[in-house]
Each structure stands twice: as C-alpha cells, then as structure tokens.
Image (tube, grey):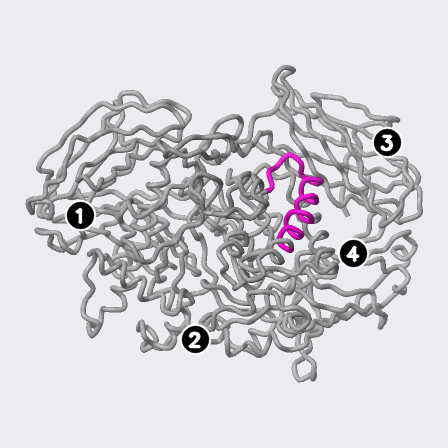
Amino acid sequence: MHLIAKVLPIFIGLVIATTHSAQPSNSYILSLNSDNLDGNWILENSNKTINLLAIVPGGVYSDLKNDTIPDIFMYDNDVQTRWVAKETWTYQRTFLVTKDILEKNTVNLVFNGVDTIANITLNDRVIGSTDNMFIKYTFNVKEYLQEGENSIKIVFTSPISEAARLSQEEMIPPECVPSYYNGECHANQIRKMQASFSWDWGPAFPSVGLWKSVNLESYNSAIITDVTTELFEDIENVQWRIHIKVFLRSAPSTKLKGNLIGILNTDYNSTTSVIKLIDEDVTGNGEIEAVFDMNVNANDVSRWWPNGYGEQKLYNLRITFESTTVPDEYFYKDIKVGFRTIELIQTPLMTGGAEGLSFYFKVNNLPIFMKGTNWIPAHLLPELGYSQEKVDTLLEAAKSAHMNMMRVWGGGVYESDYFYERCDELGILIWQDFMFACSMYPVNPKFLSSVSEEVKQVVRRLQHHPSLALWAGNNENEIALRGNWYGTASNFEHYKSEYIKLYVDLIRPVVLENDPSRVYLVSSPSNGLRSESEGFIAQNPADPHYGDTHYYNYIQDLWSMDTYPKTRFSSEYGFQALPSVDTLKNATDKPDDLRLNSSFMVHRQHSLSNGYISILSQISRHLTLPATSDPDYFSTFVFYSQITQAMAIKTETEFYRQSRYDWDTMGALYWQLNDVWQAPSWSSIEFTGRWKMLHYYAKEFFSPILVSPRLQLTHEIDVFLINDNITNIVNATLIIDTFKWSSLEPISSESKLVSVKELSVGKIPSGIEIPTNGTQMEIFYRFSLKDGNSEHMSPYNHIFPVSIKNIVGYKRPHIEIHLGDKREKYYDRARGVDIIQIDARMVTDGISLFTWIEVPLAFGWFSENGFILTEATKSITFYTEKPLNKTAFAEVVKIFTV
C-alpha cells in the first residue's frame, strides 16, 4: 500500500498552478492491490531428479549452484555445467487470492522479466507463453483465478534447443561463434542476452528463469504504466515546457473517467502542478495515452550537467490518476527529471582536404568531448547483473575517472531502473544500443512483432532519464554486412533489405514515436547521416570523416600515436590484458593452471585463436620478459600485459583528445569497463572489482586539463594543451624536465607561459628535437602544468624517445611505502561500509617505471597506481575497510616495477 497527498481540487479541463507552500497533510490509501509473487518457488527438471527451492527474481544457475552444480566460474565449469541450459525446467508455486482481489474489474498477472522461452499455466489452464527476455508480459487472469489457493507453473524450454530449432526453419548468419569461445550457436534466433551464448570476453551461460519480479495487480479503473517527458527550453520567456505523455491501462470496452494530476517539486520548496480530465472510451488492448504540458519557471530549477561540468540536479515529478467513478482509487508514478538540452550535431566540415560531417554532443548549448567507456552486462546471470552494489561500484569507478559517457553495448541487456537512476545522479550520459550485436537477424512477422513491443517498452521506460543521450539500433551490424563478416556478400541485397526492414522500417518509427527528441542512429559504428544518405549501408562505415568508429589493432606498435587513424568519435577501441594473479586464483586452486599454455589459461582466452600471441607481441616491443623457465614468468607476463594495455589505451585516448585540435574528434569511449569472469579481456576493472592499471591510467588520461605531448616522426615534440573546462587557461606555466634514467634530478628544465581557451585544445611546439646520436636511449622527458600558485593543473605526462627495453642507465630501484598517522573516515555508498582513508608515502632511490603497489583486495586499494616515479618521495592515499595497522600493512603490501 502507498500513501499519496491529495493536494488539489478536481477541475474540468487542464489547469496549471504554481504554489510556494507545503503540500497539505491529508492523504488517501491507494486501493490498488499488488500482490508480489517473488520469493520461494519450487524448481524441477524434466525427469524430476532435481527438486529444490528457488528464489524469484532469479535463474536456474543461481538456484542450482548451492546444491547441484559447482561454482560455475571455477576451472572449465562453464562447459561442465552446460547441461543445465539444455534441460527443460519448471518453476511452480501456490499463492493465495482474496475475495477483494477477485471483485476488482481487472486482475493481471505481470511478469517483468522471463528468460526466455516459456509456457505459463494458472490452475492447470494455459494463460500464455513468452519468447523475449526483454519484454514485460501482462496477462489478464481474472477468469482463471479462484478465491483461496491458486497454483502457477512456468515450463522453460532450453534456449539452446529453441535457437537450434528455429535455425532449421531459416538459418540466419552467423551460424555459430568460433569454437574457441566454447559457446553455443544461433543466439540471434531468439530475443535473449546475446552474450549468454558466449563472446570473445566471456563464457556461455544460457540461463533460464524469472529474472525479474512477478506481480499480481488488481484495480477497478486504470493504472499508470509509463510516463515520458520532452523538455523544451523557452529562453525568451525564461521557462521550460515539459511535454508529458502518460500511458494508462484499463479494461477494454469500458469508459474511463478521472483526473491526471502532475506535481513537480522544484527549488525553494515550491511546486508546479497540472490537472487534466480523462473521459475516454477504452478500446483495443486497453491502453490510453494522455498528453499535457507543464510550464516551469526557469528560475525555480537548476540545469542538469554531465560529470565535470556542474551539478546533477534532479526533480521529482509525480503523476497521479484519480478515478471519478471508482471511490477512493488512486495510482501514482514518480520519476525524476533533469532540466538539460542535448543535441547530436552533424554539420558539414572540411578536414584533411575532404568533406565530412561533424559528430559531437552539445549539452546545454556547450560542445562537450565525451570521455568514457563501454558497459557490458555486470554479470552473465542477468538477475545478478542488477545487483545495486555491483552497479554502484562500477559506476562510481567510472565517475572517479572523469567519465561523462558510457555506451550500453547491444549484446547484453537493457539495464535496471537503478542503473539509469544512478547515471542520472552521477552525470554519466548513456549511449544506448538496442540489443542486437554482431549478427544478422530474422524478420519474420512473429520476430518483428516481438521486437516492436520490446522497443516500445524499453523506450517508454527509459526515455525520461536526463542521462540518456542517444539510441543506436545495433552493434556493428552495418559494418559487418558491408564487410562480409559472415559470408553475406553473395546475397547482399537480400540481407540489406532485411537489415532495413528491422532497424529502419520497424525500430526507428517506434523510437521516434515514443522519444521524438533524441537521435536514433541505425547502427554503431556508422557514418550517421551519411550512412542514411547511402541507403543505410555506407560504402565505408569506418570513414573517418563521418559518424563514429570502432578500431582495434593487434599488430602495429600501440604505444605510438602514429598507429591510430583519425575519427570524429571513437565509440569502441581497446586492447587485452590478463587480470591479476589473485583474481585468477579465484577461478582455480591448481598452481599448474597459472601457466600461459595450461588448458585452464587456453580455455579462458577467447580472443582470436590465440590471443596471448598478440599480447606477447606488444609486450616484446617495449619490455623484456624473463625466460619462460623462470618461476616468475607468468606473474611478470600478467604485470607486463597490464602495463601494455594501460599504455596502449592511454596513447590512443590522448591521440583522440589531441585530434579535437585538427580533426574535430569529440569522443573516446574505450572497450570495456567491466568483466564477467576471471579471464583475459579488454576491461579496466576485473571481475573481482580490482582495478587494472588501465583504470588508474584512465583517471589521468581523462583529466579535465591535460598536458599531452606527442613525438613526431621528425623527432620533434609537440605539446597539446587540452582544456575540457568551461573557463579559459591563461598564463599557466608549462614545465618540460629532461631526465637521465640514472638520476632522480632532471638534467635540464624549461618553462613557458601558455594559454588555451575553454572547451578546446591548443598546440604548442616544445622546441625540443630528440637527439639521434645515441643519447636518446639515456634520456626521457616529463611534462607538467602549473597555475600561478605553483599548483599542478594536470597530471605528469612523459615522452620516452626509445622503447623501454632499449633504455640505458636505468636500474631497478629500491622502493618503500609507509603508512602515515593521519586517518579519515567516510561512508562508501557502493560498498555500504565506512572506508578509512590513510595517507601513505612512497620512497625511492631511483627512477621507477610503472610502479605497481598491490595488497589483497580484501585489505584495500590506492588512489594512484602504475605511475612513473621521478621524485624521491611521493604522497598517495590508501583506502581500507579495516583499521589496518602499519605492521599488518607491511606484511601484505607488494611493490612491482619494471
């Protein structure tokens, strides 16, 4: 039951009122009955040899793991437990229904998420079936219910079997994933998390189950299912107009009368209110759409800004339906709105001697460079991926690295309401793919009907979030079709017509009908408007003059900026690294498994036929590994792989940020933020939550102000001064220190006054030309920027004239770390615990490359890591949940350097 304040009298028509007083205290109890069917169910397999207690929301892997199957993330248990996904499973339970519920006009059984192919019976009568895990299913069940005890049964068909069966009717390429994925075939045949059949960064767990809540809802008049909002800024009249659509569901063939009341809480303890009369005949499926506007004084609200540009002010909008024919029946829905404008600007440009189009986001009329990453499901068992603690931990990590955009990738799931609410609160804009990735898809009527409902529900659910920036129809399907990734070239026109039928003729109109204010891109990557002008399949979807691009390179030197191509917006790029040895030990307790050529490590590598060769090739360009017989070879390989990944993504990201200067590049979203198991991947955060070196580097290469040097092929150094802030940098001091590898004292230091405008990049010739007489192997350069008070405005940055393995004079230093006495405590929302913040001091007797400090994850983590140590002492911060003393810390801490 809910309480709602009745704040306004009933008027006929539409009334707008603004008050500056507290709401009256009198309230009414909602007469809507909503019986939750979550909790304990019985799970049974087809031959009834397994019968156990299951928890809803949940899934079969989650329920079996305690009793019937081993830890699915250990060893090769992803394959050993595959029988689970090939079984037929039944969920069943009984529940009580009162006479009051049965006397309601409408009684619906609502499944918020069914994964995936299932038949549903209620009191031994079939009420419906499901075939799309992304859809909320609502069944009118009043005629099937009885007072007292009722029984419900959901029988799940194996998704592997159903996908195979559908492929026999029509094979849709690609037929299977590569064999070394150890996955399953035909994921594109069914509307299920595509990655659950395996991907190059994760195993196959084709789960089944009730992964979201199940509810029994009953009412006499109507309920509110969705609320969408469009915001229009009226500068001349100093106000915002909110165009509100309210979707109600009622019983078909009835008359619905009542009032919709909209109340927006604004600043200064004020409210803005609207009332609209509803008097309509209910037809069709029982859905009614009501539309009204609300005008808000611009002085009563503050703008919502992306992370790094201002506050993320959110305002509660409550929509209430109040029946005038059914006494005392009310229903309300609360959403949060943020007042901001956002545009994707694609206008003509001339760069590099060729015509093109810009591709950038303008928020509140400011052109903002998008810095961020790609989000894959937080867990391959979808019910666990909705964990609020996991979502908080990952999103807080993204914010701490100055990220302002994240791409929700199209092979996973549409994330939870909580995920988008937290993005609203943290200022992380969302590039939202629809769940189609790296495949062609069916276009038969049943499939298209299901997709149409999926898109409608998703858009209506998410549309009001200020963090939502853009819709994209799919991941990489345009470039896959043009590039003949799946052998479609011989029948290109056929697959092109099906592609257009799905993403252009079906999905786009549904999106634009329910969210006309946002851009819908047909694919990512694509040439944007240029792709559309070329019939939605561009001749070159990777054209750097248009749209967004995805770029991966495992062959050339990834520490060189000359490797990377220009782009308007890079929405995917990355390189693999292994997770820490401690994380791998979470998946095996066999020491022999921790070898590159062990069956365990081969099983965990899904990139190419042997992704370790690519990692080894990149490591060998710059670092020297010990002999393979060395007992430290594997741990060193892990460490060096993380250095290589961090340096590769640092180099590429800085190249994109520099390219705002001469190519109008306006976005860098690296692949990928998170992991789904303990394995080599492109992630910057491991499955255990430990940060790889890459994530520490992201905190620096995404800094709002960054001095970013570039070594040219002419041996000269250019310095790019990057300013993402909305204030100019005037007369700051650029300092260039030249070091010999053998000393902590620079051999020379130059400084110059520099300036750069807001939201721009300046290019400053350093005047330095790298020597070519052999001394280049003995030296390196450090770059910093200070303001008038000698405070650092940018993190240190460096240029290494030669490969690290060829430097002369460097000796591995002796390094110590000491905890200080100062301790402060704060509450960590993501972890739900108090965190102790302790000052620490690094001491070194020489230059230290890629200084990595490690403690067991349970003990804590550091503010910085993987850094180039060029000073005798350095202050950092250690964070821990435990009141760790200096002796205990000294026993667990380890320091690594090259």
The dominant secondary structure in magenta is helix
Q: CA distance from mark 2 to mark 4?
A: 41 Å
Instruction: Provide residue 378's location: percent of width, then percent of height.
Output: 52, 57
- Distance CA(mark 1)–CA(mark 3): 72 Å
Q: Callout 1, which amino acid?
A: Val
The label shown at residue 843 is: 1
**Counting other residues with Cα less than 10 Å from the Cα at mark 1, is it few (<14), some (14-19), or many (20 or more)?**
some
Residue 284 in view here:
yes
In which quadrant of the rendered image does the C terminus lie?
Answer: bottom left
Q: Is residue 683 left or right of residue 409?
A: left
**Sequence-wise first label, 2 or 1:** 2
Q: Which residue is mark 2?
A: 75
Q: Which residues are magenta?
A: 498-520
Check disc 1 and report its element: helix, strand or loop: strand
Q: Secondary structure at mark 3?
A: strand
Q: Amino acid type of disc 4?
A: Thr
- Amino acid tagged 2: Tyr
Under mark 3, the amino acid is Leu
> Residue shown at 38%/28% (left/top)?
760
Identify the disc placed on residue 210: none
Residue 290 location, quadrant: top right
Q: Which residue is mark 3?
A: 277
* Residue placed under numbered mark 4 in the picture: 138
Secondary structure beneath dot 2 equals: loop
Left/right of residue 36 with respect to residue 621 in the rendered view: right
Residue at 57% x, 25% y: name it.
Answer: 302
Give the spatial CA distance, label 4 vs label 3. Answer: 27 Å
